[in-house]
Amino acid sequence: MSDEKMLKTENITFAYEEDAAPVLRGVSCEVRRGELVAVLGANGCGKSTLAKHFNAILLPTEGKVWVEDMDTADENKLLDIRQKVGMVFQNPDNQIVATVVEEDVAFALENLGVPPQEMRLRVDEAMELAGIYKHRAKGPHKLSGGQKQRVAIAGVIAMRPDCLVLDEATAMLDPRGRAQVMKTVRHLNRDFGITVVMITHYMEEAAEADRVLVMSGGEIVMNGTPKEVFVRSEEMKSLRLDVPQAQELCLALREAGLDVPTDIISTEDCAAMLARLLQTGRADG
């Protein structure tokens, strides 16, 4: 992960109407190149509004948003910004426009006038990366929700963005579909260095991030590693948010009198701790 700034907001405020209450209130944050950042918050906290500022779908009422040092308010940079930051939304059906998977993945490239040979290479590469190459000749309507969402991701990464913003992209999927999409996202982030900002309601997804931002009332109220954030379980619950199930189990065991850590947030670490506990009677090995 680089120290180079991929995204930066400076004291941004945003209201959907001139006289309406602001949805964002003085939000300042940074996302480094190659980082995977999860953004959490209860409904109405402003997290999706913030996401739409990252590729200039929305412009701040006050303050500044920078994408690789480009000001999102600069109309001359809009196309460059949209190519740097690709967005995937909650409902894949709203992003799929063609009747064949590979044609859908090629759609944006055709609109940009990418030469056919280059387009073929980029479409095949994107479908491989998203894990849907074998479905390339199918109609999207024949795919599962998770597969459709990976088609939407392939359409975005065919543009070769430096950053991928997922706005609750797994919210409409079943557990298997969510797992498929998260596997793709981790692959793109870890193996290809694509920066990822992930707006999510699922704490297990956030637990896999490098960093977690928690929003409430249009402001960022927590910012840290997943362990640093989730260990503040009472504060999370006061914001109407959960903690990962692995941590919930550890907290319950601790309340029952067992000496177990409270900062375990992954299923794998929790399983290892339980195995040690059963074998030795000690959770810390």
Image (cartoon, helix red, strand yellow):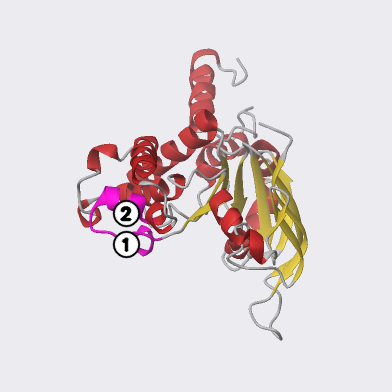
* Residue segment shown in magenta: 91-107
Q: Nearer the viewer, residue 193 or 83?
A: 83
Q: Nearer the viewer, residue 75 or 39?
A: 75
Q: Report, in whole angstroms, how far the alpha carbon at label 2 lies from the one at label 1.
A: 6 Å
Kind of residue sitting beneath label 1: Val
Which percent across, then down, holds residue 93?
33, 61
Q: Is residue 208 left or right of residue 123?
A: right
Q: Image quarter for residue 215?
A: bottom right
Few, some or many residues within 10 Å of mark 2 (<14, 14–19, 20+): many
- Which residue is painted at 41% across and 59% down in the image? 111
All told, the count of numbered labels is 2
Residue positioned most to the bottom? 19
**Residue 34, percent from left and from top:** 62, 36
Residue 274 in percent (x, y) is at 50, 24
- The circle on residue 268 is none
Specify the label residue 104 is tagged with.
2
User: Which of disc 1 and disc 2 is earlier in sequence?
Assistant: 1
The verdict on residue 194 being magenta is no
Magenta-span inclusion, residue 98 = yes
